[in-house]
């Protein structure tokens, strides 16, 4: 199946060190263009923005600018990287995926500093932790936030009822405050509904457990810290559902078949709601949402940036500011389940209504507070590449029965090798 947004983090980690892809891109934007030009191009990928809002932007700015848009298929990062390196056919405006933004920061000089164009005046509209992830060490702001991925616990209220457990979101949250609480609930569910499982795979648990902290795999001084206690604790947390027998050991190729059958809960970001709805429409009304055990993490969320070849930076900044205004952000959530990085959108009608798929629950009441509580953490350019061996070794535990301690040692060893190749101390 096509990889859904649900699986992007692991896929990004596994391909982070891939070599560039040479492509020929159409259009006459970018290098060689004249500043203050009237023709601008925008690159993004399917689902990155509301197509309706983008279409309206073309009309809204029509008297000043002719905006041409291109939805780029395939590996967006590789195509953008290759085009920037070549310096020709560069888009005036481009999307950058959240999992890729850190890798572009060492080459921040390839983009315009949005602070010079007025970002400081509107930066308070966006979540500070998200804004910082697109800042270079010297303070250059290369990206305007599109969206974020605050996490929550999705659960099957009908299966909870069948097991004789509470289904109210607040009561479920009270029973799953910690990871230990959550796994105890899973054990209870397994005892009463033997054919069910609590988590789809342990990689998803590891991903969130890491994201709940303020440190990841590389520190701000470019030192490898993937063998320290905070990562080992996340690893130990991820192994628990495997040893307890409540891990479904599902990969992306089998998830669609399982989601509507034997999974009692799902850990995922706000946009994961759409994945569940599309994969299991027959479960409409059965799902609910509550807070992530321990606290929220972020999964995904992208940016719009202006390459240095942008032919009309002032007008381009007006365009991206308009597309990503709080009111248009709210529409993006309605149109394409793109969760806004602008908190003012959370109080708008487009986001505050009841969701029929989730039994009429107002899910913004879970995701809104989660978005504001996500920890401010540092993500190094090589972070995704260094993280990849941990996912690989967790899969080896599930699929091959590898001993968790051996898998941990191998993950750390491989991560250190990748870190050295990436210039990490």
Image (cartoon, helix red, strand yellow):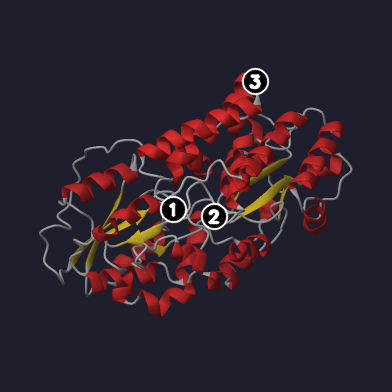
Q: Nearer the viewer, residue 278 or 145?
A: 145
- In the rendered view, would you say 179 is above or below 214? above
Residue 369 point in image, percent of width and height: 65, 65
C-alpha gap between disc 2 and disc 1: 10 Å
Q: Nearer the viewer, mark 2 or mark 3?
A: 3
Badge 1 crowding class, 10 Å Cα cut-off, few under 14, some 14 to 19, many 20 or more, is: many
Which quadrant would residue 60 be assigned to in this image? bottom left
C-alpha gap between disc 3 and disc 1: 33 Å
Which sits earlier in the primary sequence, circle 3 or circle 1? 1
Q: Which residue appears at 36% of the width and 68% of the height?
A: 139
Task: Name the secondary structure under disc 1.
Answer: loop
Residue 102 point in image, percent of width and height: 40, 53
Q: Which residue appears at 49% of the width and 54% of the height?
A: 336
Residue 6 point in image, percent of width and height: 54, 43
Q: Nearer the viewer, residue 11 or 346?
A: 11
Pointer 1: what residue? 98
Left or right of residue 31: residue 44: right
Left or right of residue 50: residue 164: right
Which sits earlier in the primary sequence, circle 2 or circle 1? 1
Disc sitting over residue 86 in the figure: none
Pointer 3: what residue? 401
Task: Name the secondary structure under disc 3.
Answer: loop
Pointer 2: what residue? 149
- Determine whether label 2 and label 1 are within 8 Å by CB: yes
Specify the farthest residue to the front.
425
């Amino acid at each position: 199946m096509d990889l859904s947004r649900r699986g992007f983090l692991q896929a990004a980690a596994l391909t982070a060190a891939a070599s560039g892809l040479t492509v020929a891109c159409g259009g006459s934007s970018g290098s060689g263009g004249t500043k203050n030009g009237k023709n601008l191009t925008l690159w993004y990928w399917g689902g990155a923005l509301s197509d309706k809002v983008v279409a309206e932007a073309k009309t809204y700015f029509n008297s000043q600018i002719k905006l041409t848009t291109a939805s780029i298929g395939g590996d967006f990062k590789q195509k953008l990287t290759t085009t920037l390196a070549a310096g020709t056919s560069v888009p005036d405006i481009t999307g950058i995926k959240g999992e890729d933004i850190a890798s572009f920061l060492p080459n921040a000089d390839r983009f315009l500093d949005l602070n010079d164009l007025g970002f400081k005046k509107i930066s308070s509209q966006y979540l500070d932790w998200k804004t910082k992830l697109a800042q270079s060490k010297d303070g250059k702001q290369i990206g305007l936030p599109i969206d974020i991925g605050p996490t929550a616990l999705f659960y099957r209220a009908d299966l909870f009822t069948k097991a004789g457990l509470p289904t109210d979101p607040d009561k479920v949250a009270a029973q799953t405050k910690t990871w230990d609480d959550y796994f105890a609930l899973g054990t209870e569910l397994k005892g009463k509904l033997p054919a069910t499982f609590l988590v789809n795979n342990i990689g998803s648990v590891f991903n969130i457990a890491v994201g709940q902290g303020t440190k990841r795999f590389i520190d701000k001084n470019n030192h490898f810290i993937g063998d320290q206690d905070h990562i080992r604790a996340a690893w130990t947390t991820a192994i628990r559902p495997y040893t307890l027998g409540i891990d479904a050991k599902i990969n992306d190729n089998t998830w669609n078949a399982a989601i509507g059958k034997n999974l009692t809960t799902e850990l995922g970001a706000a946009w994961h709601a759409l994945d569940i709805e599309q994969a299991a429409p027959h479960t409409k009304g059965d799902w609910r949402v509550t807070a992530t055990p321990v606290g929220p993490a972020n999964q995904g969320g992208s940016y719009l940036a202006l390459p240095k070849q942008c032919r009309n930076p002032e007008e381009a900044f007006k365009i991206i500011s308009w597309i990503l205004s709080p009111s248009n952000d709210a529409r993006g959530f309605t149109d394409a389940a793109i969760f806004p990085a602008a908190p003012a959108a959370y109080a708008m009608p487009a986001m505050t209504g009841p969701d029929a798929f989730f039994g009429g629950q107002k899910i913004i009441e879970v995701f809104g507070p989660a978005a504001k509580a996500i920890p401010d953490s540092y993500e190094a350019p090589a972070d995704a590449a260094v993280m990849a061996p941990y996912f690989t070794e967790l899969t080896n535990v599930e699929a091959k029965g590898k001993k968790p301690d051996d898998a941990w040692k191998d993950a750390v060893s491989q991560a250190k090798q990748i870190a050295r190749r990436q210039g990490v101390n």
